[in-house]
């Protein structure tokens, strides 16, 4: 009751005379209460009670492999590679079993398949437990996004609204009620990206290289969840270059990194941390880079090996950091310390693979392009034609992918349950206003975010830009919109602000529920689980057709 009274008090004290203030009806804590309550209600209405077989890809696989880990059996699922979500779920199931919330937490404790009723009951418990973990991860993602966005734009109203739009974006709304690996990967990467943007805008600080190291570790952990964030990693130098120190940071006198007696010992410490972390991760590095794609018959030839494209990426990121040093006049010791910290963070992230070491996870993480091309060619056989990226079939696919991305942006030519499309329309219109006012730094920041959004979506067309992939780029659109709203302050007072804002909020709430509600009425049943049967080495489901015998 006390919390509800404080929430009502915040409503009464909000200034509703300005159009934008009328959109943000609650104070900062109230925004979280409303957002999380909406997520929880949506989760309970459609998602939590789905039968365990309703969304078997990936629910069934993630639960199955978590049970294997808890039974001290090897992981069997390495597609991309899904390692970190499976590992977290295994710990989560053990914790719930320890407090008697669920009755089974390992594969060895499953009821016999002859007792189908008990088997279904246990599996339903396990799947619901996994869905609750997904909801917790989604809420943590929204909370981190909101807090970091507030630090970036320095306006809690904009940040609160941005967090709400993320919570009710099409990708996150569906993923918070399933166990797909994109949720954790996107959450880790976007959190790291915002940390880097905030550190860039704050200017020179003693702790800035440490932030870069932490962000590097989070991004590496994201790769261990879903290798598709490789493309976002490639975009990092472009994404961060326009985000230099803001005007307020110039009032801070230069100190730590421009004082040799402080800067050089800190640089030496950063270099030592990078050397130690690299030494500890040496076995993973040797194994990951020593495995040739030729040893994997399912992989399509790329024309270059993993060692080549990872070296190119490392040089690219190094050039990006060098360009940032020149453009924003960063102290040389700080730049070098940041490079060493980024390396240390990456190596520390790789060490997590040792928690439950499986060589196939290492191979997937170190060969992301080959791994993704396997799935892309299964969806688009044209991508497997020829040995050159400029093969006519591949060029044709690229042109059609670009056309498909453009058609999706119109919404009317190709509708989808993705409400951030309408937010993109606002971003484009507001960016035109910024161009006319010659706010070139703001224009550059918005441009790199939107170009990355469209480029990554174009690459995602290799898998027909599935709903699960929206979560990688929707946050970029929301960050771009937040930057425009926070900097073009007169738009907050425009007479169209309130109706357009209400329309965007309504579109997010309504469209984001289309897929979850649709799944409530799906008629396809347990045969969805049977489609996963071929991947289960230790479990033959009694209600599925028998697997064909392996050739002798």
Image (tube, rainbow, N blue to C red):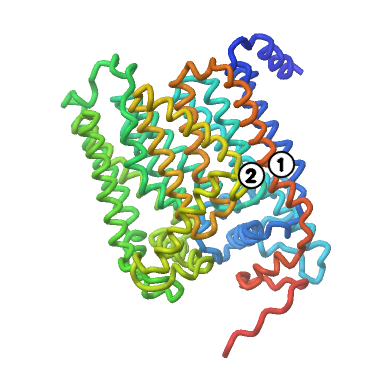
**Residue occupying image coordinates x 52% and y 69%:** 378
Circle on res. 176: 2
- Image coordinates for residue 217, horizontal then vertical, percent: 40, 44
Task: Give the image location of residue 444, x and y in percent.
Answer: 35, 33
Q: Quadrant of the N terminus?
A: top right
In-image side of 64 versus 463 (left or right) = right
Judge whether 275 appears above or below 543 on screen: above
Instruction: Give how far apart the Cα atoms at labels 2 and 1 are.
Output: 8 Å
Residue that protrudes farthest toward the bottom in the picture: 552
Q: Position of residue 353 (x, y in %)?
A: 44, 55
In terms of secondary structure, where does tag 1 sit? helix
Residue at left offset 49%, top offset 37% = 477
Q: Looking at the picture, tell me which residue is in the foreground, 464 or 227.
A: 464
Say which label, 2 or 1, has the lower sequence index: 1
Along the viewing direction, whichever of 55 and 345 lies nearer the viewer = 55
Residue farthest along the left direction in this orientation:
260
User: 481 or 223, which is in the foreground?
Assistant: 481
Q: Is residue 336 above or below residue 527?
A: above
**Mark 2 neighbour density, 10 Å: few (under 14) some (14–19) many (20 or more):** many
Image quarter of residue 283? bottom left
* Residue 246 image position (x, y, % from top left): 33, 22
Question: Residue at label 1?
Answer: 43
Q: Is residue 349 left or right of residue 511?
A: left
Secondary structure at badge 2 equals loop
Residue displayed at 64% across by 60% down: 57
* Mark 1 nearby-residue class (10 Å; few <14, some 14–19, many ≥20): many
Tell whether label 1 touches label 2 (CB within 8 Å).
yes
């Amino acid at each position: 009751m006390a919390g509800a009274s404080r929430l009502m008090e915040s409503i009464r004290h909000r200034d509703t005379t300005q159009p934008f203030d009328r959109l943000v009806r609650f104070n900062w804590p109230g925004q979280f209460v409303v957002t999380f309550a909406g997520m929880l209600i949506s989760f309970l209405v459609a998602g939590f009670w789905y039968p365990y077989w309703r969304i078997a890809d990936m629910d069934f696989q993630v639960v199955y492999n978590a049970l294997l880990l808890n039974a001290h059996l090897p992981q069997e699922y390495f597609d991309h590679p899904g390692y970190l979500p499976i590992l977290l779920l295994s710990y989560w199931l053990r914790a719930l079993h320890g407090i008697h919330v669920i009755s089974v937490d390992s594969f060895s404790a499953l009821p016999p398949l002859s007792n189908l009723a008990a088997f279904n009951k246990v599996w339903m418990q396990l799947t619901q437990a996994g869905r609750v973990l997904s909801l917790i991860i989604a809420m943590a993602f929204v909370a981190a996004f909101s807090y970091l966005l507030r630090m970036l734009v320095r306006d809690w109203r904009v940040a609160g609204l941005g967090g709400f739009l993320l919570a009710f974006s099409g990708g996150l709304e569906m993923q918070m009620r399933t166990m797909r690996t994109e949720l954790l990967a996107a959450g880790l990467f976007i959190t790291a990206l915002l940390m880097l943007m905030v550190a860039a805008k704050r200017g020179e600080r003693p702790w800035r290289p440490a932030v870069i190291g932490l962000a590097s570790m989070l991004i590496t952990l994201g790769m261990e969840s879903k290798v598709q964030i490789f493309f976002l990693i490639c975009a990092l130098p472009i994404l961060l270059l326009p985000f230099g120190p803001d005007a307020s940071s110039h009032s801070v006198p230069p100190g730590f990194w421009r004082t040799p007696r402080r800067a050089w010992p800190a640089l030496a410490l950063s270099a030592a941390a990078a050397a130690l972390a690299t030494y500890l991760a040496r076995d993973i590095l040797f194994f990951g880079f020593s495995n040739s794609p030729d040893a994997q018959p399912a992989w399509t030839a790329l024309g270059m090996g993993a060692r080549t494209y990872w070296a190119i990426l490392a040089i690219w990121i190094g050039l990006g950091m060098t360009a940032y040093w020149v453009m924003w006049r960063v102290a040389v010791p700080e730049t070098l310390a940041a490079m060493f910290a980024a390396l240390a963070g990456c190596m520390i992230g790789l060490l997590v693979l040792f928690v439950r070491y499986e060589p196939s996870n290492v191979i997937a993480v170190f060969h992301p392009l080959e791994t993704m091309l396997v799935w892309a060619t299964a969806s688009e056989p044209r991508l497997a034609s020829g040995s050159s990226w400029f093969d006519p079939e591949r060029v044709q696919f690229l042109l059609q992918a670009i056309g498909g991305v453009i058609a999706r942006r119109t919404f009317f030519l190709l509708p989808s349950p993705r409400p951030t499309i309408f937010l993109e329309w606002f971003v484009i219109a507001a960016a035109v206003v910024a161009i006319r006012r010659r706010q070139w730094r703001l224009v550059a920041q918005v441009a790199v975010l939107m170009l990355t959004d469209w480029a990554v979506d174009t690459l995602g067309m290799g898998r027909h830009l599935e709903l699960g992939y929206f979560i990688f780029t929707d946050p970029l659109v929301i960050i771009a919109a937040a930057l425009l709203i926070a900097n073009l302050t007169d738009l907050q007072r425009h007479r169209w602000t309130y109706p357009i804002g209400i329309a965007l909020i309504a579109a997010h709430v309504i469209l984001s529920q289309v897929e979850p509600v649709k799944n409530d009425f799906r008629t396809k049943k347990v045969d969805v689980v049977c489609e996963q049967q071929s991947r289960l080495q230790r479990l033959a489901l009694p209600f599925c057709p028998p697997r064909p015998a392996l050739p002798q």
